[in-house]
Image: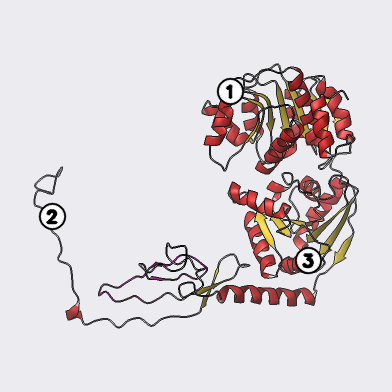
Amino acid sequence: MGLNKALLTALAATGYEKPTPIQAKSIPDVMKGKDLLGIAQTGTGKTAAFALPILHRLAENRVAPKPRTTRALILSPTRELATQIADSFKQYGAHLGFRVAVIFGGVKYGPQERALQQGLDVLVAAPGRLLDHIQQKTLDLSQTEIFVLDEADQMLDLGFIKPIRQIVSRIPAKRQNLFFSATMPSEIGKLAGELLKDPVKVQVTPQATTVERIKQSVIWVEQGKKRALLTELFSDPAYTRCLVFTKTKHGADKVAAYLEAGGVEAGAIHGNKSQPQRERALEAFKNGKLRVLVATDIAARGIDVDKVTHVVNFELPYVPEAYVHRIGRTARAGKDGTAISFVAGDEMKLLKDIEKVTRQKIPAIDRRNDKALAQLDASIMSAGVAKKATLPEREGRSDGEGRGGRGRGGRNPHREGVKQEGGGQPHRQRRGRNGAPAAERPAVAYDPMAGDRARSSVRAAPAAEPKPVGELQRRPRRRRPSNGGKGHSAQA
């Protein structure tokens, strides 16, 4: 293809031998500076399809970027995808010496501002934090030569159309525009028509099709038995690295807690998690420390993990196209994969919409009214509650593992407190007016599956007997001066 020799050296080191269809059709035109609209299903190599020719063009016309500017700007809908794209640019351009940075929300501004101050060859960003830097004048897009919008349809779903227009208005009209997406709804087609100039259209697969190597199936099951069914699946050792998708953030946490109670190593990742929490969970999943990662749709396109054996749709997505992106997390880079969807009675319409969009009939298994699932659910629930209710006392531990008070090695001898159930630090003991300890609150057993505290009384200490009224020591009431203090009138 005539790519820069430094790029070919990096590609050889990563094991790339021949381009995928989207890469073969996109790279030559992007190298020529043409605008491009690329449509390809997830996992087909879209990132390299624009990263390689962009790096080639920047190397052919090497110019030192000015402070607070970037020569190429790539917009991404999620933090994880932005990080993945930036890593790809660094990997492919390892021998070119370009400055590459990624900015998104949920982390401190300082390191991002310092990176922008030096000037960048490639900037990968999420729209929200990017606009913050533009408004704070720590970023100037007047020197940007190439603009890429990745996963354009998800940008639309997340409501980023207005921020995208604001960002584009800051970029010079003379630029190269690249749009890449797995699907092409009419709204994105309209936006592409406004921003792209005589674009080359590359479509390597029909819209919203699923990877043929993914073995798909549906299991009909009651909503209340989905967690037990999910735990049952992991009795199969073939489920070595699995992604589970839920509709809500709270639901992701509950499913992960339920799996942990059932003996399955699981973690959760969603928008309410801080960026360090999300990175730690994803890293543990990549390293095999977590067998399951439970995620919301925010991660459907941002997770690129090798050897994901199974994708489980714990709940079907409201948007049929999201199903394509979810199951596309497996069967990547030519590998095979399995996708299983749990479908309750109120999700039948969602399943029909998915089958209509993907133009296929997904084979189904009926597990409704399965007594074995009911028994498994009851045993896991009781085991989870018992585990939380029987946590060891932290203050009286002699092994130094407790965190009582502020000390690191056990209880704080200078602060005798009442231990809170669930591992929290002890608080200062409350006392009544007469100085006697107030009644202890009953400890509670925490049910990780319920999402709130189950009010089950475990112990309750009897209240101390009050002293006679005559023994109460009341503090004399202080009276204000007649002039009311500074700033007040004598009458007040």
Report whether 288 appears left or right of 417: right
**Horizontal side, residue 167 vs residue 241: left or right:** left
Residue 265 x, y percent position in the rendering: 70, 63
Residue at 87 percent of width and 44 percent of height:
209
Compared to residue 202, the image places residue 60 above or below, namely above
* In this rendering, position of residue 355 left or right of residue 373: right
Examine the structure image and report whether residue 262 is included in the region drawn in magenta.
no
Q: Secondary structure at mark 1?
A: loop
Examine the image and state in which quarter residue 32 appears.
Answer: top right
Residue type marked 1:
Asp
Q: Secondary structure at mark 3?
A: loop
Under mark 3, the amino acid is Phe
Disc 2 element: loop
Residue bearing the label numbered 2: 480
Lower position in the chain sequence, tag 2 or tag 3: 3
Q: Which residue is mark 1?
A: 140
| Secondary structure predominantly adopted by residues drawn in magenta | loop
Q: Position of residue 466 (x, y in %)?
A: 27, 81
Q: Dots 1 and 3: beta carbons under 8 Å?
A: no
In-front residue for pair 91/28: 91
Residue 170 horizontal/vertical position (percent): 61, 22
- Residue stretch rendered in magenta on the structure: 417-440
Vertical order, 335 against 478 (above or below): above
- 359 sits left or right of 272 in the view: right
- The residue at 43%/69% (across/down) is 411
Tell me the residue that label 3 is attached to. 234
Q: Disc 1 to disc 2, how far (Cα)?
A: 60 Å
